[in-house]
Amino acid sequence: MRSQQIIVIGGGAAGFFGAIAAANANPSAQVTLLEAGRQPLVKVSISGGGRCNVTHACFEPALLVQNYPRGGKALRGAFSRFQPRDVVAWFAAQDVNLKTELDGRMFPTTDDSATIVDCLIWAAKKAGVVLRTGIAVTKVRKLADEENCPSTKFVVELKSGEEFWCDRLLMATGSSPAGYKIAQNLGHQLESPVPSLFTFNIADPLLRELAGVSVDPVKLQLIAGKEGDLQKLEQTGALLVTHWGLSGPAVLKLSAWGARALHNCRYQATLQVNWLPQSHRDLLLKALQAAKTETPKRAIATYCPVNLPRRLWQYFMHKAEIADDLRWADLSNKAIAQLVSLLNASTYAIAGKGVFKEEFVTCGGINLKEIDFKTMESRICEGLYFAGEILDIDGVTGGFNFQSAWTTAWLAGQAIANRIS
């Protein structure tokens, strides 16, 4: 009796993890992993600034799913079966230890993404997975249950003209258009892919001069859409000023939750920033009035009575048209009120999006209603499984996108192996 044939398309995090899970769960099966690029795991190697943010130290599924603008509901049950704690244990079993940083992100103790890449490649080889790189898949055909091939379900056609036959197929092609096309040809619906996790371009020359200045926390409110169909989203966290506008965790999270709305309005929206959310408007007013009373001879430019970087404070002075040499005693009540308004609710026009490093995340993908999240098997096409970013799942920054990849891949691998054992 011939061994069962499993093919995994896509040599990224989800593809490797799914292939390893299937091979380990059913050692008699032949698992082949096909990657279009010459090098596998490229995204893993560049993630986290080259350190690889493997997962996040959030071990309660009900809390974990709150970090997914799309897919959280579907992942709730999946995380009860394989979650960050299981990822930590899996890598530890491969002699790769992870550490937790103050914000909850988890990295290998080596601070080197090559540790994760090498681990996955070694684990795949140990499990007997056959890795083939530079293999571009152009089409997948599903066969009827014919007498001469009762268990073979799919024919995978390559750009080279070569064909692979398999019993089960795992699609882990990320946000690749080729992967989407294959899934659609097999009967699946696609939620149109648009960017997620990006920075905001702000056309404010004075603000851009503050590149490198960070404030934590700030409170952001995004207003996107047209009159009658406005969406308002809020996010609190750290903000970073860049030479093109605004970035930092708060902006990235806001871009994820507002990904679809921002795409629909062509990334032309309004952003309101409360630079001191921990200080109520009345408290800010009292702090500035106290500075006028208690330090009347000091220059406003050199004495900031609130907790802000000096460069940012001087930026607000310029926005309020306050001269650099003006003393606190000479500051009018009207100018004080204007400063309070700027600190409490500065408004900026978003004029496009930037790229967050090289970590591309997509909102959109295969419709989740067409997937059985207990097994990751297609409800449309028997024997077809999905894992990773090809699905309409995306998380905020912090290791959550890798976690959904590990979870969906592990579930798919286990299900494929059990199905054909």
Image (tube, helix red, strand yellow):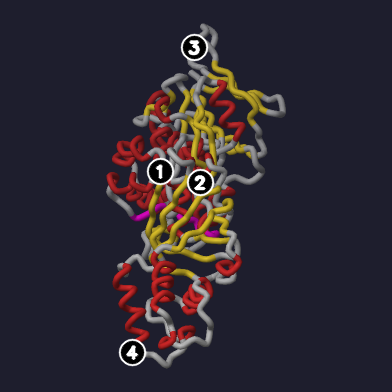
Q: Is residue 149 magenta?
A: no
Question: For the residue labelled by badge 3, is the local secondary structure a helix, a strand or a loop?
Answer: loop
Q: Nearer the viewer, mark 2 or mark 4?
A: 4
Of pointers 3 and 2, the one earlier in the residue sequence: 3
Q: Residue 230 sits in which quadrant?
A: top left
Residue kind at label 4, given as amino acid type:
Glu
Q: Residue 286 sits in which quadrant?
A: bottom left
Of pointers 4 and 3, the one earlier in the residue sequence: 3
The answer to whether mark 1 and mark 2 are in CB contact below 8 A is: yes
Establish if 381 lies above or below 342.
Answer: above
Residue beneath disc 2: 196
Q: Residue furthest right?
A: 160
Of pointers 1 and 3, the one earlier in the residue sequence: 1
Q: Residue at x 34, y 81 (%)?
A: 289
Residue beneath disc 3: 150
Residue kind at label 2, given as amino acid type:
Ser
Residue beneath disc 1: 69
